[in-house]
Image (cartoon, grey):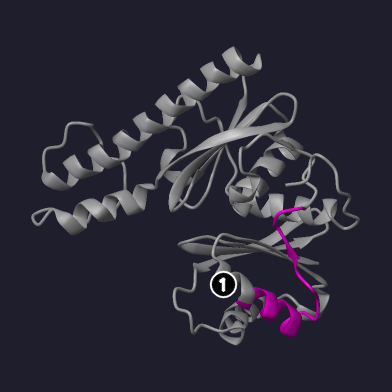
Protein backbone atom coordinates (compact mmCIF):
# COMPACT_ATOMS: atom_id res chain seq x y z
CA UNK A 1 0.00 0.00 0.00
CA UNK A 2 1.07 3.57 -0.69
CA UNK A 3 0.79 6.40 1.80
CA UNK A 4 0.47 9.66 -0.19
CA UNK A 5 0.98 12.92 1.72
CA UNK A 6 0.22 16.42 0.47
CA UNK A 7 1.58 19.14 2.79
CA UNK A 8 -0.06 22.49 2.11
CA UNK A 9 0.39 25.82 3.85
CA UNK A 10 -2.78 25.38 5.93
CA UNK A 11 -3.74 21.71 5.78
CA UNK A 12 -1.99 18.40 5.24
CA UNK A 13 -3.95 15.67 3.46
CA UNK A 14 -3.00 12.01 3.77
CA UNK A 15 -4.28 9.26 1.48
CA UNK A 16 -3.92 5.50 1.62
CA UNK A 17 -3.85 3.73 -1.75
CA UNK A 18 -4.25 0.00 -2.31
CA UNK A 19 -3.02 -0.33 -5.89
CA UNK A 20 -5.25 2.12 -7.85
CA UNK A 21 -7.92 2.49 -5.17
CA UNK A 22 -7.88 5.34 -2.67
CA UNK A 23 -8.99 3.40 0.38
CA UNK A 24 -9.10 6.27 2.85
CA UNK A 25 -7.95 9.84 3.43
CA UNK A 26 -7.45 12.13 6.38
CA UNK A 27 -6.94 15.88 6.82
CA UNK A 28 -5.00 17.66 9.56
CA UNK A 29 -3.63 21.13 10.17
CA UNK A 30 -0.13 21.57 8.79
CA UNK A 31 2.37 21.79 11.68
CA UNK A 32 3.13 25.46 12.19
CA UNK A 33 6.08 25.41 14.57
CA UNK A 34 9.72 24.61 13.94
CA UNK A 35 9.94 22.34 16.97
CA UNK A 36 7.26 19.90 15.81
CA UNK A 37 9.16 16.71 15.15
CA UNK A 38 8.90 13.65 12.96
CA UNK A 39 7.75 11.73 16.03
CA UNK A 40 4.86 14.13 16.66
CA UNK A 41 3.80 14.03 13.03
CA UNK A 42 4.24 10.27 12.97
CA UNK A 43 2.01 9.89 16.03
CA UNK A 44 -0.84 11.70 14.27
CA UNK A 45 -0.41 9.72 11.04
CA UNK A 46 -0.24 6.39 12.85
CA UNK A 47 -3.38 7.25 14.83
CA UNK A 48 -5.26 7.92 11.58
CA UNK A 49 -4.14 4.60 10.14
CA UNK A 50 -4.69 2.48 13.24
CA UNK A 51 -8.03 4.05 14.19
CA UNK A 52 -9.33 3.36 10.68
CA UNK A 53 -8.46 -0.33 10.96
CA UNK A 54 -5.44 -0.56 8.65
CA UNK A 55 -2.23 -2.44 9.35
CA UNK A 56 0.87 -0.26 9.19
CA UNK A 57 2.89 -3.30 8.06
CA UNK A 58 0.98 -3.27 4.75
CA UNK A 59 2.32 0.18 3.89
CA UNK A 60 5.44 -0.28 1.78
CA UNK A 61 5.71 3.11 0.04
CA UNK A 62 5.43 6.77 1.02
CA UNK A 63 5.14 9.62 -1.51
CA UNK A 64 5.25 13.30 -0.61
CA UNK A 65 4.10 16.57 -2.13
CA UNK A 66 4.99 19.56 0.01
CA UNK A 67 5.17 23.35 -0.24
CA UNK A 68 6.47 23.70 3.34
CA UNK A 69 10.18 22.74 3.42
CA UNK A 70 10.55 22.58 7.22
CA UNK A 71 7.70 20.05 7.38
CA UNK A 72 9.06 18.09 4.42
CA UNK A 73 12.22 17.22 6.32
CA UNK A 74 10.26 15.91 9.29
CA UNK A 75 7.95 13.86 7.05
CA UNK A 76 10.98 12.31 5.36
CA UNK A 77 12.36 11.31 8.77
CA UNK A 78 8.96 9.97 9.79
CA UNK A 79 8.80 7.79 6.67
CA UNK A 80 12.21 6.30 7.35
CA UNK A 81 11.54 5.64 11.03
CA UNK A 82 7.95 4.39 11.03
CA UNK A 83 7.49 2.96 7.53
CA UNK A 84 11.05 1.80 6.92
CA UNK A 85 11.23 3.30 3.44
CA UNK A 86 12.77 6.21 1.63
CA UNK A 87 9.92 8.48 0.53
CA UNK A 88 9.39 9.58 -3.06
CA UNK A 89 9.46 13.38 -3.21
CA UNK A 90 7.91 15.56 -5.90
CA UNK A 91 10.83 17.83 -6.71
CA UNK A 92 12.95 19.17 -9.52
CA UNK A 93 14.14 16.48 -11.93
CA UNK A 94 11.30 13.97 -11.65
CA UNK A 95 9.51 12.48 -14.65
CA UNK A 96 6.10 14.09 -15.28
CA UNK A 97 5.29 13.38 -18.96
CA UNK A 98 4.41 17.06 -19.25
CA UNK A 99 6.42 19.49 -21.33
CA UNK A 100 7.06 22.36 -18.91
CA UNK A 101 6.85 25.80 -20.57
CA UNK A 102 7.11 27.76 -17.31
CA UNK A 103 9.95 30.32 -17.26
CA UNK A 104 11.36 28.97 -14.00
CA UNK A 105 10.16 25.37 -13.52
CA UNK A 106 11.66 25.10 -10.03
CA UNK A 107 9.14 27.70 -8.86
CA UNK A 108 6.12 25.49 -9.58
CA UNK A 109 4.66 24.09 -6.37
CA UNK A 110 4.70 20.32 -5.96
CA UNK A 111 0.93 20.32 -5.49
CA UNK A 112 0.44 22.16 -8.77
CA UNK A 113 2.54 19.58 -10.62
CA UNK A 114 0.60 16.76 -8.97
CA UNK A 115 -2.71 18.40 -9.94
CA UNK A 116 -1.62 18.90 -13.53
CA UNK A 117 -0.34 15.36 -13.98
CA UNK A 118 -3.51 13.90 -12.44
CA UNK A 119 -5.71 16.08 -14.68
CA UNK A 120 -3.87 14.90 -17.80
CA UNK A 121 -3.81 11.22 -16.85
CA UNK A 122 -7.36 10.94 -15.50
CA UNK A 123 -9.40 13.50 -17.44
CA UNK A 124 -7.29 14.24 -20.53
CA UNK A 125 -6.11 17.52 -21.97
CA UNK A 126 -6.40 20.37 -22.61
CA UNK A 127 -7.30 20.96 -18.99
CA UNK A 128 -7.46 23.65 -16.33
CA UNK A 129 -7.19 22.80 -12.64
CA UNK A 130 -8.57 25.24 -10.08
CA UNK A 131 -7.30 24.41 -6.59
CA UNK A 132 -9.14 26.14 -3.76
CA UNK A 133 -6.63 26.25 -0.92
CA UNK A 134 -4.64 28.83 1.02
CA UNK A 135 -4.16 30.38 -2.41
CA UNK A 136 -6.51 29.73 -5.30
CA UNK A 137 -4.36 28.41 -8.13
CA UNK A 138 -5.14 27.86 -11.80
CA UNK A 139 -2.91 25.46 -13.74
CA UNK A 140 -3.23 25.06 -17.48
CA UNK A 141 -2.29 22.06 -19.63
CA UNK A 142 -2.51 22.42 -23.42
CA UNK A 143 -3.85 19.84 -25.88
CA UNK A 144 -0.19 18.87 -26.49
CA UNK A 145 0.32 17.95 -22.82
CA UNK A 146 2.28 21.15 -22.21
CA UNK A 147 2.21 22.82 -18.81
CA UNK A 148 1.81 26.33 -20.15
CA UNK A 149 1.51 28.28 -16.89
CA UNK A 150 -1.05 29.41 -14.39
CA UNK A 151 -2.61 32.05 -12.19
CA UNK A 152 -2.33 32.48 -8.41
CA UNK A 153 -4.79 34.51 -6.35
CA UNK A 154 -5.28 34.89 -2.57
CA UNK A 155 -7.55 32.18 -1.24
CA UNK A 156 -11.05 32.63 0.13
CA UNK A 157 -10.16 32.16 3.79
CA UNK A 158 -7.01 34.28 3.96
CA UNK A 159 -8.68 37.15 2.11
CA UNK A 160 -11.64 36.99 4.47
CA UNK A 161 -9.39 36.83 7.53
CA UNK A 162 -7.53 39.93 6.34
CA UNK A 163 -10.83 41.83 6.13
CA UNK A 164 -12.00 40.70 9.58
CA UNK A 165 -8.65 41.51 11.19
CA UNK A 166 -8.56 45.10 9.89
CA UNK A 167 -12.23 46.21 9.88
CA UNK A 168 -13.06 46.88 13.53
CA UNK A 169 -16.83 46.53 13.19
CA UNK A 170 -16.88 43.45 10.96
CA UNK A 171 -16.92 40.06 12.67
CA UNK A 172 -15.96 36.72 11.17
CA UNK A 173 -18.82 34.82 9.51
CA UNK A 174 -19.16 31.19 8.50
CA UNK A 175 -18.83 30.72 4.78
CA UNK A 176 -22.20 29.54 3.50
CA UNK A 177 -24.18 30.80 0.55
CA UNK A 178 -26.94 33.30 1.42
CA UNK A 179 -30.42 32.83 -0.03
CA UNK A 180 -30.09 36.07 -2.02
CA UNK A 181 -27.18 38.21 -3.14
CA UNK A 182 -28.68 41.36 -1.58
CA UNK A 183 -28.02 40.98 2.11
CA UNK A 184 -30.51 42.21 4.71
CA UNK A 185 -27.99 42.06 7.56
CA UNK A 186 -24.24 42.53 7.87
CA UNK A 187 -23.45 38.81 8.07
CA UNK A 188 -25.33 38.05 4.85
CA UNK A 189 -23.78 41.10 3.17
CA UNK A 190 -20.36 39.70 4.02
CA UNK A 191 -21.25 36.21 2.81
CA UNK A 192 -22.54 37.62 -0.49
CA UNK A 193 -19.49 39.78 -1.00
CA UNK A 194 -16.98 37.06 -0.17
CA UNK A 195 -18.58 34.12 -2.00
CA UNK A 196 -20.08 35.88 -5.02
CA UNK A 197 -16.96 38.00 -5.27
CA UNK A 198 -14.74 34.95 -5.48
CA UNK A 199 -17.14 33.18 -7.82
CA UNK A 200 -17.03 36.17 -10.17
CA UNK A 201 -13.24 36.27 -9.97
CA UNK A 202 -12.94 32.54 -10.67
CA UNK A 203 -15.26 32.55 -13.67
CA UNK A 204 -13.75 35.73 -15.10
CA UNK A 205 -10.22 34.28 -14.90
CA UNK A 206 -11.37 30.99 -16.43
CA UNK A 207 -13.03 32.83 -19.31
CA UNK A 208 -9.83 34.78 -19.99
CA UNK A 209 -7.70 31.61 -19.79
CA UNK A 210 -9.95 29.77 -22.25
CA UNK A 211 -9.79 32.68 -24.69
CA UNK A 212 -5.99 32.74 -24.47
CA UNK A 213 -5.77 28.97 -24.95
CA UNK A 214 -7.68 29.32 -28.21
CA UNK A 215 -5.85 32.40 -29.48
CA UNK A 216 -2.29 31.52 -28.45
CA UNK A 217 -2.25 27.72 -28.32
CA UNK A 218 -4.96 26.92 -30.90
CA UNK A 219 -6.57 24.72 -28.26
CA UNK A 220 -10.05 23.18 -28.18
CA UNK A 221 -12.24 23.75 -25.14
CA UNK A 222 -10.48 22.48 -22.00
CA UNK A 223 -11.78 20.20 -19.28
CA UNK A 224 -11.96 22.24 -16.06
CA UNK A 225 -11.49 20.49 -12.73
CA UNK A 226 -11.99 21.97 -9.28
CA UNK A 227 -10.16 20.59 -6.25
CA UNK A 228 -8.90 21.57 -2.82
CA UNK A 229 -10.33 21.89 0.65
CA UNK A 230 -12.69 24.76 -0.19
CA UNK A 231 -13.85 23.47 -3.57
CA UNK A 232 -17.15 22.30 -2.04
CA UNK A 233 -18.19 25.95 -1.72
CA UNK A 234 -18.33 26.37 -5.49
CA UNK A 235 -19.89 23.11 -6.62
CA UNK A 236 -22.80 23.82 -8.99
CA UNK A 237 -22.02 27.55 -8.76
CA UNK A 238 -19.36 28.10 -11.41
CA UNK A 239 -20.39 28.46 -15.05
CA UNK A 240 -17.25 26.64 -16.14
CA UNK A 241 -16.12 24.10 -13.53
CA UNK A 242 -18.10 20.94 -14.18
CA UNK A 243 -15.83 18.37 -12.49
CA UNK A 244 -14.91 18.48 -8.81
CA UNK A 245 -12.34 15.98 -7.57
CA UNK A 246 -11.31 16.66 -3.98
CA UNK A 247 -8.67 13.92 -4.13
CA UNK A 248 -6.98 15.13 -7.32
CA UNK A 249 -3.70 16.11 -5.65
CA UNK A 250 -3.36 12.79 -3.82
CA UNK A 251 -4.08 10.96 -7.07
CA UNK A 252 -1.36 13.02 -8.75
CA UNK A 253 1.12 12.14 -6.01
CA UNK A 254 0.32 8.47 -6.54
CA UNK A 255 0.64 8.73 -10.35
CA UNK A 256 3.99 10.52 -10.09
CA UNK A 257 5.28 7.90 -7.67
CA UNK A 258 4.45 5.22 -10.26
CA UNK A 259 6.03 7.17 -13.12
CA UNK A 260 9.29 7.57 -11.23
CA UNK A 261 9.91 4.02 -10.09
CA UNK A 262 12.28 3.79 -13.05
CA UNK A 263 12.92 7.50 -13.71
CA UNK A 264 14.34 8.72 -16.97
CA UNK A 265 15.82 12.14 -17.67
CA UNK A 266 14.08 13.75 -20.63
CA UNK A 267 12.45 16.99 -21.70
CA UNK A 268 9.36 16.19 -19.63
CA UNK A 269 11.26 16.31 -16.34
CA UNK A 270 10.75 19.37 -14.13
Q: Secondary structure at mark 1?
A: helix
Foreground pick, 184 / 201 = 201
Pinpoint residue 244: horizontal percent, then vertical percent: 56, 39
Residue 157 in picture, x, y percent from top left: 35, 52
User: How crowded is the residue under tag 1: few (<14 C-alpha within 10 Å), some, or many (20+)?
Assistant: many
Left/right of residue 28 with respect to residue 113 in the rendered view = left
Quadrant of residue 139 within the rendered picture: top right
* Residue 267, placed above or below residue 16: above
For image coordinates 79% across by 57% down, the residue present is 257
Q: Is residue 21 visible in the rendered structure shown here? A: yes
* Residue at mark 1: 71
Viewer-nearest residue: 143 or 59:
143
32 horizontally vs 227: left or right: left
Q: Is residue 120 left or right of residue 198?
A: right
Residue at 35% across, 29% down: 200
- At horizontal 34% and vertical 53% (from top left) the residue drawn is 158
Q: Residue furthest front?
A: 103
Quadrant housing the N terminus: bottom right
Q: Is residue 32 magenta?
A: no
User: Is 158 displayed left or right of 253 in the figure?
Assistant: left
Residue 219 appears in the rendering: no
**Above or below 40: residue 140:** above
- Identity of the residue furthest to the left in this view: 169
- Please state the total of marks drawn on the protein image: 1
In the image, the segment drawn in magenta is 74-93
- Residue 54 percent coordinates (x, y): 73, 75
Figure check: 184 above or below 44: above
Amino acid sequence: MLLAIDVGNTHTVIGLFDEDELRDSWRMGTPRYKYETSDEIGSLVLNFINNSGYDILNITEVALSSVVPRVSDEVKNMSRKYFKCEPFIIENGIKTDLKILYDFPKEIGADRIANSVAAKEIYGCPAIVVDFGTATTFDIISSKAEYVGGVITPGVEISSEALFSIAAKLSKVDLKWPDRIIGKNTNDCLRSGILYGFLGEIDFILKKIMTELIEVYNSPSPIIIGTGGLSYLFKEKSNYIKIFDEDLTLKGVKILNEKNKAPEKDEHNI
